[in-house]
Image (cartoon, rainbow, N blue to C red):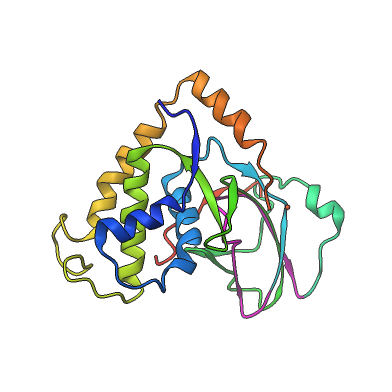
Amino acid sequence: MIHNYIESSVVVGEVYSNYAIKSSGWESNAPMWIFHALGQLGINRFTLDRDPALIEFLDNRFMLPEDCTLVTRLHIFENGNEPDREDFERPIIPGEVKTPYIQKGSWIHVPYVDEGFALIKYKSFPAEYNEKLDQIYPLIPNDENLKKYLREYLLMQILMNGYSHPIYNLTVNNPWVNPQFMIEKSSKKAKISVGRMDALDRHKVSKMIQTFISPELSTTFYINDINR
């Protein structure tokens, strides 16, 4: 049973010790990768509503907030028509969204709108500022299967960004050395393991995360792997 949340920065140290990574250049991306890994896993039971994000975009695309794991509402305003306060509260009627968009990882592409504003309501995991690493990391259930999945996900992203490892790589069809195959198995175990929380555990964790301060349609979708 899971009785507490921990700061996910512990996984960063485990990546170094488990895989003997010799470079630290990837650390700045680690929080974003962890948020995206959690979003792809789909364990949104204890995510929190964030303040709506208003993003001005050019060139037919914009990036979702990096801590986003689940988008709950998306409005596109064309050609500089900036939304007002009423737009932040107005629900989307099914079928109302007429502006086509394409999601590619953390990017939203709007083929028929060159520039405008995107109003996004979304959820993400509670987070804490890590003073030593000078970054905000999501809090995660203290579950070994989940941590294993996150370690393998980070390893995959490190390799995708050009790091050369003497053992692990993304080109061989071997589940023991290719993290793309590893996470297929570990993601299922993590989801089942975290899902085993009983009513008392859920109440304890839910009560605890409400004490953390979050940094401050209807179309809903999950964040996919940022490199897909």
On whether residue 157 falls in the magenta region, the answer is no
Query: Looking at the rendering, in which quadrant would you find the C terminus?
Result: bottom left
Closer-to-camera residue (86/96): 86
Q: Which residue appears at 21% of the width and 68% of the height?
A: 169
Q: Which residue appears at 86% of the width and 55% of the height?
A: 85
Report x, y in % for residue 21: 29, 67
Report x, y in % for residue 182: 24, 52
Report x, y in % for residue 140: 48, 43
Query: Looking at the rendering, in which quadrant would you find the N terminus?
Result: top left
Q: In the rendered image, which quarter is residue 87 located in?
A: bottom right
Q: Which residue appears at 61% of the width and 49% of the height?
A: 219
Q: Residue furthest right?
A: 85
Residue 204 shown left or right of residue 42 in the figure: right
Q: In the rendered image, which quarter is residue 191 located in?
A: top left
Q: Residue furthest front?
A: 132
User: From which residue to which does the magenta span run?
Assistant: 57-79
Q: Is residue 49 above or below residue 199?
A: below
Q: Is residue 208 above or below residue 18?
A: above
Q: Is residue 228 above or below residue 37?
A: below
Residue 176 shown left or right of residue 153 in the figure: left
On whether residue 67 falls in the magenta region, the answer is yes
Q: Which residue appears at 50% of the width and 61% of the height?
A: 32
Closer-to-camera residue (134/92): 134
Report x, y in % for residue 41: 41, 46
Number of marks present in the image shown: 0
